[in-house]
Image (cartoon, rainbow, N blue to C red):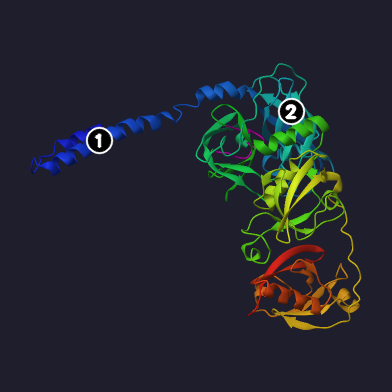
Amino acid sequence: MKSQAIALQSRPADSTGPLASLLAALTLALALLFAQAMPGYAQQRPETFADLAEQISPAVVNITTSTTVAGRTGPQGIVPEGSPFEDFFNDLDRGDGDRQRRSSALGSGFVISADGYIVTNNHVIEGADEILIEFFPGGEEAVPAELVGTDPNTDIAVLKVDLEDLPYVEFGDSNSEGARVGDWVMAMGNPLGQGFSVSAGIVSARNRSLQGTYDDYIQTDAAINRGNSGGPLFNMDGEVIGVNTAILSPNGGSIGIGFAMSSAVVTNVVDQLIEFGETRRGWLGVRIQDVTPDMVDAIEGLESARGALVTDVPAGPALDAGMLAGDVITTFDEIEIEDTRELVRIVGNSPVGKEVPVIVLRDGETEALTVVLGRRETSEAVAFPASDESTESPEEAEILGLTLSPITEELTEQYGLSADEGLVITSIDPDSEAASKGLLEGDLITEAGQQKITSVEDFEARIEEARDAGRKSLLLLVRRGGDPRFVALVLEE
């Protein structure tokens, strides 16, 4: 920038008037500004990762697992397609028929304590009957590891080796301040079975979900390949902010889209596996769905599409606390809830038995509840209570593009209904808003305007009440195959 400024200043001037002087002054100021700013920015970028790699690499390990599988005839492999062992399969016995064979898989991990606790991915060790740990820099004999516990929901496993005074690494902050988009990160592991390897990149995105219930992945462009699974993702302070788990790729190799489960999730799982040998997640005991923009006008007191809408409350902690279907959970444990995914993650990370303050929106007013959390692993399968029987006489009507009928024995048998109260959709206008919202013939509407309905008259009354209140849409609770969800339909003028 300095040479550019000199060149600009050396141009012949057409005049020596005020304009020329002003341009010269501006040019000099810009040159000084860039000359000062650019070196400062460059100093923020690491000149080398060598010192950091040397410092933390002794805590990174290679993991080899062995599994005994039944032999097969023919050319096919001996593990199912899609198995985590498939790409690393090494047939150690070429016998035919039903002879047992050994398959092996390779992965990565890292030591988190001096007495030998090691973290890796569940899919690295799943189904293995022998687990061997090789420490960096290699050359030493691999040592056997004991499986402490696994959590398939987050794909985390904890191992233990019988060694002392091991070098180890600690977990760091993977939240917005500790792992910002654009921050430098470094991945370590055993890619493609090639042995210890280091790659570097940045945090590309945060809070990614890969369809898991508790997903909170850090996306990075640091090269992650098969065999890196279970290895650590480090920040520049040498702290583990993620466990390398998956890649997005059309060809199976790294294209710069890798995912590491955040330390915010992993630390809680690891602590539970070490203490109990299993996870013990908090359980609220509700079915929920996201609040959509078209529901805002239909739910009294709701100002924006945020929170978690309760669709059903079985016997459990929430019911004991007085929570009702139709409540919108806005705050849990003093944390404002944006959507269902956030609520599920927070509840799951809460200890079993904890008394938690919960704020819900109900009938336009806020209600403060106190919930004593249960344990998800043992309570989630609690059955939903059956509804009371309907005594209304059948009457069919067409409303909002829906043909509705009270429940009859014939309709129950025809559509396999799991409840005996509400209105059955017997047909639907394909051009209606209801059809565009995904409603189908055979769906059962059990609530309208957050009130139970048992007849067409009830439904029509809820519509009139909504119109009288100045609402433009009506909130319906719809059940399909026993699963409830809310749908808001615009009221016809």
Residue located farthest toward the top when viewing the structure as drawn: 165
Mark 1 vs mark 2, foreground winner is 1
Relative to residue 365, is residue 70 depicted above or below? above
Label 2 packing within 10 angstroms: few (<14), some (14-19), many (20+): some
**Kind of residue indicated by mark 2:** Leu
Which residue is rendered at x = 69% and y = 36% of the image? 266
Pick the residue in front: 357 or 152. 357
Which disc number belongs to residue 132? 2
Question: What element does badge 1 sit on?
Answer: helix
Residue matched to label 1:
29
Q: Is residue 180 among what the camera can see?
A: yes
Which residue is rendered at x = 74% and y = 26% of the image? 117
Q: Is residue 132 magenta?
A: no
Relative to residue 268, is residue 365 depicted above or below? below
Pick the residue in front: 321 or 123. 321
Magenta span of residues: 223-234
Which residue is rendered at x = 59% and y = 39% of the image? 225
Q: Position of residue 430 (x, y in %)?
A: 67, 79
Query: Which of the 4 image quarters holds residue 472?
Result: bottom right
